[in-house]
Amino acid sequence: MKMQSNDSYSTEVWQTMDAAHHIHAFVDQKKLNAEGPRVIVKGEGMYLWDSEGKRYLDGMSGLWCTQLGYGRRDLIEAASRQMEQLSYYNMFFHTTHPAVVELSELLFSLLPGRYSHVVYTNSGSESNEVLIRTVRRFWQVVGKPSKRIMIGRWNGYHGSTLAATAMGGMKFMHEMGGMLPDIAHIDEPYWYAHGGDMTPEEFGLRCARQLEEKILELGSDNVAGFVAEPFQGAGGMIFPPESYWPEIQRICRKYDVLLCADEVIGGFGRCGEWFAHQHFGFEPDTVSIAKGLTSGYVPMGGLVLSRRMAEALVEQGGVFAHGLTYSGHPVAAAVAIANLKALRDEQIVERVKTDTGPYLQRCLRELFSDHPLVGEIQGTGMVAALQLADDKATRKRFEKEDEISWRCRTLGFEEGVIIRSTLGRMIMAPALVASHAEIDELLDKTRRAMDRTAQSLG
Ligand code: PLP
């Protein structure tokens, strides 16, 4: 019998109604309408169910966001209690409310001491929109208004709104009305694809030094900041060589360019530290957050500022003409508090560092090092990528890598596991609460999808 998400509608009816009105994310809508989207009706723990009753192990935490998995009572009850108490109020009109005050207190108890203030948003894209204006405002306030240019990386992803798209490095997004002036890009530190004969460490230094060249080309008096994900997520889950971040840090300090970490997916325990920059050992001036802040139960994000920036903006800045209706939304704040307390009090981040993360990484390498399709395995904590390779010895990538990785993702769905394909790499980022048994299931099903992909290539 078909499982229906309410008494009246079948999968086909949901699909038909969806096709009539809904434009989906990053998809050829006409094709999707013809095929019909999967209708997800229920989530619990690590699992999702579709309207046909099929169960999937969610190996992607939704979109890198459900740190605690689905259906946690404490988060649901926190939202419900807050709605009863104060369902909405804003941060305009010289007001605040207890939920947002308590959240800020908790957030800064988890962040390193060099940060002191946060601007709340509703998404990762908004956090990065706020970033560009806040960084430029900072330089105005400290008397260097010519510092306006943001440097990002090719294939970086910072969201889908205008400034976030422009700072990101997805050329196909720029071409769809997504570019702005005063934005520049340098190469991504993707050794497997672009490292040639260099060692990863040599290549990491070379990529980092492109930042110095770009700053010198543009003039350091004109460059406001460098924005990058500690590990590049949507652009292929690229982990830079170890030489990369220390050199980037040195260059930013030398030229007084703000180092802006986009931790929208790296934040809140993904790498086994509260923030990914702690894992990679650098000290950004700003940290963009979202996703794992609420485990995706309700939308919330933010831009975290260093003391240096906050002091200038607060003490010297006067009015900053900025504000969002839902900044610091009380229901989102209440859910974020419950989420952060669970991550902290149940030692979930520590477990990712010392137990489940190493287990996932070890098993992944045991299972896939010899796989005929896999040229490289990267990852740490609860995030990993399998590089598809046509010829492992020469690091040759498949010409049709998008098609092949897409097939593997579809076979994953058939096997009952959700993994993602991006730029010729299969990626996974399960919820941080995954048990050893759930990690085993994730990897076994992924292995079956990979084996079937290999067989399909003959
Ligand atoms: N920054 C990074 C690194 C992301 O991965 C994403 C989304 O995946 C965003 C920003 C945008 O976040 P949102 O989709 O919440 O706007």
Image (spheres, grey):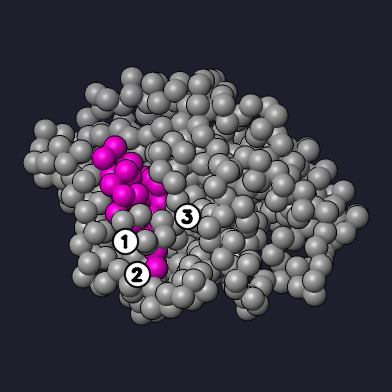
Residue 2 tag number:
none
**Highlighted range, magenta:** 223-252
Give the label, 1 or 3, closer to the camera. 1
Front residue of 207/413: it is: 207
Task: Name above or below for residue 146 compared with residue 262.
Answer: below
**Residue 90 x, y percent position in the rendering:** 78, 68
Task: Name the residue carrying label 3.
Answer: 285
Q: Residues within 10 Å of mark 3 (few under 14, many from 20)?
A: many
Kindly identify the amino acid type of the residue bearing the numbered disc 2. Answer: Val
Q: Is the residue at mark 3 in contact range of ligand 1, meaning its CB lies under 8 Å from it?
A: no
**Residue 404 x, y percent position in the rendering:** 28, 46
Q: Residues within 10 Å of mark 2 (few under 14, many from 20)?
A: many
In primary-sequence order, the first of circles 1 and 2 is 2
In primary-sequence order, the first of circles 2 and 3 is 2
Q: What SS does tag 1 mark?
A: loop
Front residue of 402/87: it is: 87
Residue 255 tag number:
1
Give the label, 1 or 2, closer to the camera. 1
Indicate left or right for 110 with 86 as reference: left
Q: What SS does tag 3 mark?
A: loop
- How far is the residue under mark 2 from the one under mark 3? 15 Å
Task: Name the residue carrying label 2.
Answer: 223
In primary-sequence order, the first of circles 1 and 3 is 1
Kindly identify the amino acid type of the residue bearing the numbered disc 3. Answer: Asp
Q: What SS does tag 2 mark?
A: strand
Q: Residues within 10 Å of mark 1 (few under 14, many from 20)?
A: some
